[in-house]
């Protein structure tokens, strides 16, 4: 089964174009280094729940949009090797220093796939 890295974060609406440009560079880097797929999606139907929800999870502020992203790999071992290469890739160094979102409110993690099509 594949391995998945998942991300949820909040992007200020006036930074969406900058975020998209950063995401397109990141996609190219991840895919070059061996990721199977790379997806970035803007929240379109993310209601605030009573206890939990995407907006609550990232402490969404007014004039921000939730972003839900995932990257797939052939295995956890591939993910670890690809991630090492990605983190060393100079094309992303600038992005880490000037991200168009608040990285402290980003949620991320790695997941073993149990059902897939």
Image (cartoon, rainbow, N blue to C red):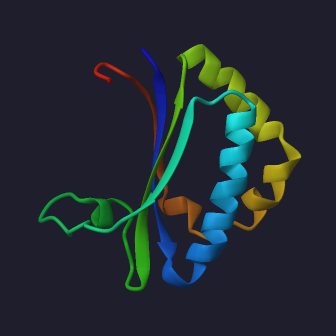
In the orientation shown, which residue stands out farthest toward the right?
90
Side (left or right) of 67 relative to 104: left
Residue 15, quarter of the rendered image: bottom right
The residue drawn where x is 48% and y is 23% is: 3
Side (left or right) of 15 relative to 85: left
User: Which quadrant would the N terminus be assigned to in this image?
Assistant: top left
**Residue 89, position in %: x, y?**
83, 41
Above or below — where is 59 with respect to 13?
A: above
Above or below — where is 82 with respect to 65?
A: above
Residue 56, quarter of the rendered image: bottom left
Above or below — where is 92 with respect to 102?
A: above
The residue drawn where x is 63% and y is 18% is: 78
**Residue 24, position in %: x, y?**
67, 56
The residue drawn where x is 30% and y is 19% is: 114
The residue drawn where x is 37% and y is 22% is: 113
In the orientation shown, which residue stands out farthest toward the front?
117
Side (left or right) of 107 relative to 89: left
Label count reads 0
Above or below — where is 3 with respect to 59?
A: above
**Residue 106, position in %: x, y?**
49, 56
- 102 or 5, which lies in front? 5
Side (left or right) of 37 relative to 94: left
- 58 or 92, which lies in front? 92
User: Which quadrant would the C terminus be assigned to in this image?
Assistant: top left
């Amino acid at each position: 089964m594949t391995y998945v890295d998942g991300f949820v974060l909040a992007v200020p609406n006036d930074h969406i174009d900058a975020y998209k440009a950063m995401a397109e560079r990141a996609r190219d880097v991840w895919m070059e280094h061996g990721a199977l797929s790379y997806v970035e999606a803007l929240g379109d139907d993310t209601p605030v729940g009573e206890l939990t929800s995407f907006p609550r999870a990232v402490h969404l502020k007014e004039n921000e949009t939730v972003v839900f992203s995932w990257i797939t790999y052939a295995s956890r071992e591939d993910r670890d090797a690809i991630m090492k290469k990605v983190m060393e890739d100079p094309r992303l160094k600038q992005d880490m220093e000037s991200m168009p979102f608040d990285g402290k409110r980003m949620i991320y993690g790695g997941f073993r796939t149990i059902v897939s099509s």
